[in-house]
Image (tube, grey):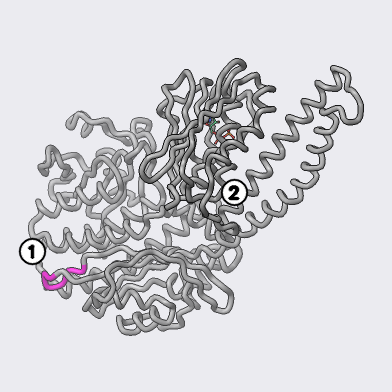
Amino acid sequence: MIVKEENKQMFGQLLLDKKIINQKQIKEALEVQKTNGKALGNILIDLGYTTSDLIKSVLNITRKTEQKLAHLFNTSIGMMKCIDQASLFKFIMTEAKRILESDMCNLFLVDEEADEFKCVFIYNEEVREIRLPLSNGLAGYVAKTSETIKLEDAYQSPLFDPELDNNLGYKTSTVLCIPVKQQSNKVIGAIQVVNKKGKGRFTSYDEWLLKSFAIFASNAISMVSAGKIKNPKTRFAENMNMFNLAVENLAEGVIIITQDDDAVVVNPAVKWMLGWKIKKDIDKQETEELLEKSGLGKISKWLRGEVDSLTSEEITIQIPEVRVIKVEFSEINGEINYERKKGCLVVFKDITRDKKFDQVKSEFITIASHELLSPITSMKNAVNLLLQEMLGPNTDSQKKFLHIINDGVEYLSNLTTTLLDITISEIRKVPLKREKVDLDKIIKSTIESQWFKAEENKVSLINNNGSHPSVLADSNRTRQALLNLLDNAFKFTPHGGEIVVSTKSTEDEVEISVKDNGAGIFLEEQDKIFERFYQVENATTKKHYGIGLGLSICKDIIEAQGGRIWVESKGRGGSNFVFTLPLYK
Ligand code: ADP
């Protein structure tokens, strides 16, 4: 069957093109595949020639794989239901455009008798048609050579003919054009999607998606041209079969199962990931039994209507090594005999390596920062002793250098604590200790600990806090968030400036604000600064230490306590950082 060979070749070719593997390795993998039937990608990983991350990057699998695949499946069913050419063409073009997240789709069909292309497109919601010579443009090349064309700027290609653009008053930039073939491998035309949304480019995964889409489209076009209307049950089974072949070489596991049809899609990656030792053909009952054994009995329950929804989850399988698999679901349109039956598409992603890597990374950072913290603390104490002239008076230049050391040590100490914090929050080793907390006390003591800094920075630090009922919070974490905000305010407020801490309580919460009259933050940056590693690029920020983590940590801390955090600023003239904490009731 062409689909199978096509995909195999394409996937292998992709890896070769990207120089991820060489000819010899792919040959070896194809030999192994004949003996064990595993997906090509997985064999290459087993042989140690590549990694799942590399394969993922080649296929550019996005987080929404399951949705794209479900959409592809639903569309293939929809196509089979179109009974005339006009509605079929419209459906194909609208859906290809949507699935490929592009601005437009054109269909070029070879009219052998007239030696022309029938070029079909949608203009003002209507299907239009123009005639073009068979040798014309990108589609002409694709139909003649059966090759795919992927362009980032169509106007740079000598093959591109701007005629269609002129007709439509349109400007093509990115293009993906692939041949449309019959099962016999005969090319009947080309399908082209234009201008990937969001100024993106068409990826190799898009190429796979459009090729699979074209197989369904070609099948539907032949059916409509021959005036053959198959019965819905046969159509559905045929679709399942075609889909099975389309996903056969995907690195992700894919299952499609419906309420009351016997046909199922189970690709080789599923069998490998979940350790299912089964023969090639598998029916619905067997699939349900194996899903149950793999801890996914909820799928059958959902099909029977015993649970309302399916949410993604991670499962751990031991076969014999431990594998962590992310399982995601998307509903499909299991339409049989014109009745809408329940059906779902399940995608399995092996995230064992990612998990292991995350764990090792977190452990490493935790250990490293712990190891760093103790010498840094000793240095900090020693410099403080010297600065306070406990060991005798310092000369002016000694003082100057001690201040430089002090700043550096302070920065290292903050950075190390921050790193520790991220890993701790990532691995969630330290749960929040939420209790009744006297907020006034926290604010007072935190501000007092910063008098020295205020003096050093020649900034007035004002405590404008009134008195408030207690809040429900983790006192250490809250102090840490407040300190981070004060630290930033000191960084971005010039000499002579002012930092005011004030509070306001409402029925359910207290708002704590740290207001400065320093650099300010423009509106477009106000959300971004709470993201990890984000820093506003300007002359003021360049003068300061920092890696863009303080505010993201504040956000984590405050949100974990049920509060919110935001900034108010007109861009200049200062910023007001506000966070809330729930009242203790
Ligand atoms: P860091 O201070 O380590 O760079 P943060 O996450 O604490 O990271 O802050 C992110 C960015 O937000 C800073 O780089 C700075 O551009 C901006 N910012 C934070 N606080 C203030 C403030 N009080 N005034 C002006 N800009 C600020």
| Some atom of ligand 1 lies within 8 Å of the CB belonging to the residue at label 1 | no
- Magenta: main secondary structure equals strand
Q: Residues within 10 Å of mark 2 (few under 14, many from 20)?
A: some
Task: Please say whether residue 88 is visible from this viewpoint.
Answer: yes
Secondary structure under badge 1? Answer: loop
Region of the chain picked out in magenta, as a range: 334-339
Give residue 244's position: percent from left, percent from top.
33, 70
Q: Amino acid at mark 2?
A: Ile
Q: Spot the residue most to the top.
A: 496
Could you tell whether 280 is left or right of 234 in the image? right
Which is more toward the observer, 460 or 129? 460
Query: Which residue is tagged 1?
Result: 227
Quadrant occupied by the N terminus = bottom left
Residue 173 in the image, given as x and y percentages of width and height:
33, 34
The residue beneath circle 2 is 422
Q: Tell me what residue is drawn at x 41 percent, y 50 percent.
A: 204
Q: Residue at x 20, y 29 (%)?
A: 169
| Disc 2/disc 1 C-alpha distance (Å) | 63 Å
* Disc on the earlier residue, 2 or 1: 1
| Residue 214 sits inside the magenta stretch | no
